[in-house]
Image (tube, rainbow, N blue to C red):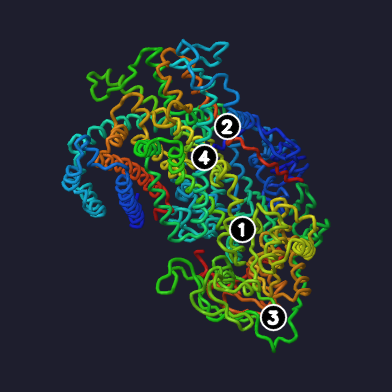
Amino acid sequence: MIDHHDTPRGLRLPRFGYAFNMTGRIGLAVILFWAVIAIIAPLITPYPPGEIVDWDYFGPVSKSYWMGTDYLGRDILSRVLMGARYTVGISLAGVTLACAGGIVFGMVAAVIGGWFDTILSRLLDAFNGIPSLLFGLVVVAAVGSSIPVLILTLAAIYLPGSYRFARALAVNVNTMDFVTVARARGEKTGYLIRAEILPNILGPVLADLGLRFVFIVLVLSGLSFLGIGVQPPHADWGGLVRENIEGLSLGAPAVIFPCIAIASLTISVNMFIDNLPKKIRDRSQ
Amino acid sequence: MLRSLTTWVLVGQRLGIALITLVIVSFAVFFATEMLPGDVAEILLGQAATPEAVAGLREAMGLNEPAFSRFLGWLGGLATGDMGRSYVNDIEVVDLLGRRLGNSLRLAAVVTMICVPFALTCGIAAAMWQGSLLDRAVSILTISVISVPEFMVATLAVLIFAVWLGWLPALSYGADATSFVALIKAYAMPVITLTCVVSAQMIRMTRAAVIETINTPYVEMALLKGASRRRMVLRHALPNALGPIANAVALSLSYLVGGVIIVETVFNYPGVAKLMVDAVATRDLPLIQSCAMVFCVSYLSLITLADVIATLSNPRLRQ
Amino acid sequence: MTHPLVSVRDLVIGAVTDSGREVEIIRSVSFDIQPGEIVALIGESGSGKTTIALSLMGHCRPGCSIGSGSISLGDKTVTDLSEPQRAALRGTEVSYVPQSAAAAFNPSQRIMDQVIEVTDIHNLMPRKEAEEKAVELFRALALPDPDSIGQRYPHQVSGGQLQRLSAAMALIGDPSLVIFDEPTTALDVTTQIEVLRAFRSVMDHSSMAGVYVSHDLAVVAQIADRIIVLKGGEIQEVGSTRDILENPQHPYTKELLAAFDPVPFVSARAQDVERRKPILEVKNLSAGYGAVVKGVPNFKVLDNINFRMERGTNLGVIGESGSGKSTLARAVAGILPRYQGDVLSDGEELRADLKDRTKDQLRRIQIVFQLADTALNPSQSVGSILARPLHFYHGLDRKARERRVIELLDMVQLPSNMRHRLPGELSGGQKQRVNFARALAAEPELILCDEITSALDTVVAAAMLDLLKELQRDLGLSYIFISHDLSTVEAICDEVLVMYKGKLVEALPAASMSQDAAHPYSRLLISSVPQLDPDWLVNLEHDPEMIRAMDGR
């Protein structure tokens, strides 16, 4: 579901030979910002994220509490910074597992073909029919919520889609003459997958990984919003919204800032993927 | 238009594949729910779970039979409309589910009626005037909506329509509404939220499908015959994009039955998704299995319908 | 002198590269077309011939735009018109016959609706009248079932018929100029003749002017009054068809013509042929695709093929698309396992499936494909593409591989620093050389060449053939040369197999193909190859029975 709309003409970075426009750069900057925050969060939180620091609950934006305080009077800025860890970390682990599995199965199915391909494809297609959030809910409700369970569930939800995407790409590459040449040379399946297919599907597969990351962030936030994601006293961004939902009618910053955090991450991943750097191929050179 | 026999053979094949998939899915659903931790008899008996009582109840419920024969029995029951009795409140699952499914389908139908014409118009218009101001605006809007969690759209709707403007109630009890106005008010919020979320997906996929067909030699040929942009898109690109568009619509709509859990929760709307979540909490196996089957059947029938439309719209496959 | 119908003055067309740099792809081109005259634009790929032709309709492909200069058509200046005004010209004043009619017809509409669409767009006449006119055109273009062919869908008629139908689509609005954009390039030679004949007869009986875009001088010679030779977006030479063919001035034109006169091939047959076993012997070979029922696949392609080939000789395989010639190469290589028959090399049986063959057997027979674009992995450098067979078959270490890669590049006359490039950065001819060098890296005895010069421009293809001959002399190779182009096969082969519908109809010595051909299909195929003589098509007479047999394709 990559959107191929016209983008403003690329600026040129002559040293790398890549064209990368402003929208894409902003997207990448925001992604990197949150990634850095997720890593260094404990070092920069102004207050301990679990500590009640203010008498006033749902406090407004102020000099000492930049994003106000939550329903217990905890500092929202600190909680948002720590929440980045959960949201980014869990989603990243989930998407990595889902895509790694999907790509490997997809390529193997495309290269081997036959019964293996048919059965695996049908099975995963059928699995696709189960609504993702609901599946997550059922599993977590049944097994109990913990971070490994969340990661595995999210990976399981998005593996079939990733498989389907990677398989479609790999099937296309597999029909190319260079793969036939390698086969005729006597190469084994392992080499075909590693050297001939993988490098040629990597670009689109990484873009797909980005989109899937967005979906996972959204589902994870949804699970936390329903109260079965990351468990208190810790909270990811979805959990922060849930905790402070009563502040909504007051227009409390405690509910607005976590929302902005989620939106800023997902929108910038989308922006980045729609405007990936393009390698410059100058035909006249 | 005369359709040859092979068309119907192809359609029959699609239906056959759907049916086989359904059996595979029911198998998966049955054994996945079997694997849910916790013994049903123990949970049902609660405080009174003495070993003898548990054993007796297991015997009475047929839990001691082999799993596979229970599966066949269950499948046979499903085929004849017997979904079993709820463990928890001892009501026929059919009755329990029927009421909730009615609610879910009503909501889905209303959203579909608004969403499909709106999304198709937007998607096609954006593709037709690709790169225009309209296209950019549509792209930015849809990307924002799909990037944002559904509960944010829902809470935003509450904030605007219920809290600030005070036009609509924040909670929805659609089934109990008495007057027409009350009915509209009750449905308005879930419908607004779902329309936003579902049409954003649909617009993006429709636009991509139409643009793909615009970049074909036969559409360029139409241009070289002197056709206007409108004619190129509506007469030449659109009929050939019908398959992918039907698929996009089906995928988005399949979301409306099972994917609406957040909306059902936020607006307290009594639909199937919520029923299933509650059923999981109480380990009500027959109910969980039936709910899961409802979702899979709705997904499969939508996808199969799209497949059949794609087959019928393609003269190559048709003859 | 009459007032010209088309007048192009100092036309410059620019394109924007990926990096946003503007380049001129058409540089200051000027020419006129008189009413009723047919002018050919000839040149290799990238010469700008299609770009110029489309600009006459006021259309540029995405990324291109008319920079300066003027184009006038009749009393209108196309370059000054707005887009709706240009649209009004298309189909009525100037119309277009596309290269691939199969792609240019909308698959979901009936043919008639598309042929008469021009009359509907421009409100020229009522539908009934338009349909009658279309049927008349179908008849004039010698299409079968002219009354009912319009009711079919595009996929239900053959490529040659579609190409004629697209001409009907162009002629329905009575334009004063018709643009033919390589309309016969995608067709087989026997079909090409029928289409060319049909075009010629319609153009002869009307007063329309034409622009005929092509890379093939012999085809152009049959239809054009005047030829414009293009290269690199500039006009090299303009002259009447006869002048250009008989008295070319520009070196590039001379080169194009020279490529038509192949140097006679001298076989490099080994001296001790008699004592050694044939390098390839094929007995009762049958192969096909699809589900296998009782040992026989659903779609049989090759039926009972027999031939033998001596070491050091070259074997040509000709036939049109669908005749099974590429399948033959795949069956020999084991890519498509045969279901019946034997393949022997040096008297040693080769198993049907390549998975069952030894590494050495695989090494000895290499296959090279037509499209270097898809035959080279776009994400590997030329160096690693060539190094892989060296490692795989010969187990060379890194240093030895590097040395050998440079040697191989030198053998195919490419500079050694090209090993650091990616295939996407090479020209078509360079890619095909790398493609061939990869086969050489295995140190094979037999190379199966599947249309390896077909996608190349005339001059580049001629150079490639010279290289193949030279390598054969130096390395003692044998080639099986599969091609639809008879002159290519003639230039490099000792013997030629003619294939038709999966069967081998005749084996002929390459040097005397046209004299020796006995089978009616071989005669039809050989006589269908266009000659540089402008009167060739007019004087050509075909066996009417064979043509009937071929009709409907």
Residue type at the position of mark 1: Thr
Density class for disc 4 (Cα within 10 Å; few <14, some 14-19, many ≥20) is: some
Q: Secondary structure at mark 2?
A: helix
Give A220 or A171, whichever is nearer the viewer.
A220
* Residue C189 can be seen, yes or no: yes
The numbered disc on residue A93 is 4
Q: Residue at x 43, y 42 (%)?
A: A157
Asked if the residues shown at circle 1 and circle 2 are in contact, with their CB atoms under 8 angstroms apart, the answer is no
At label 2, which amino acid type do we have?
Met
- Find disc 1 in the rendering and name its residue: C184
> Given this view, does label 2 or label 3 mark the residue nearer the observer?
2
| Chain containing mark 2 | A
Judging from the image, what secondary structure is the residue with disc 4 in?
Answer: helix
**What amino acid does circle 3 point to?**
Arg
Question: Same chain for the residues at labels 3 and 4, yes or no?
Answer: no
Give the spatial CA distance, label 1 vs label 4. 56 Å
Q: Nearer the viewer, mark 2 or mark 4?
A: 4
Camera-near label (3 vs 4) is: 4
- Disc 2 marks which residue? A271
Estimate the spatial distance between the alpha carbons at disc 2 and disc 3, rounded to whole Å.
61 Å
Please name whichever residue, C320 or A267, is drawn nearer the observer in this view of the structure. Answer: A267
| Label 1 neighbour load within 10 Å: few <14, some 14-19, many 20+ | many
| Residue indicated by mark 3 | C311
Where, by quadrant of the figure, is residue A195 drawn?
Answer: bottom right
Label 1 and label 2: CA atoms lie apart by 45 Å
Q: Please check whether the numbered discs 2 and 4 fall on a single chain.
A: yes
> How many residues crowd mark 2 within 10 Å: few (<14), some (14–19), many (20+)?
many
Of all chains, the one bearing label 4 is: A
- Disc 3 packing (10 Å; few <14; some 14–19; many ≥20): many
Image quarter of residue C494: bottom right
Q: Kindly report the distance in space between the C-alpha atoms of the residues bearing marks 1 and 3.
A: 37 Å
Query: The disc labelled 4 sits on which kind of residue?
Result: Ala
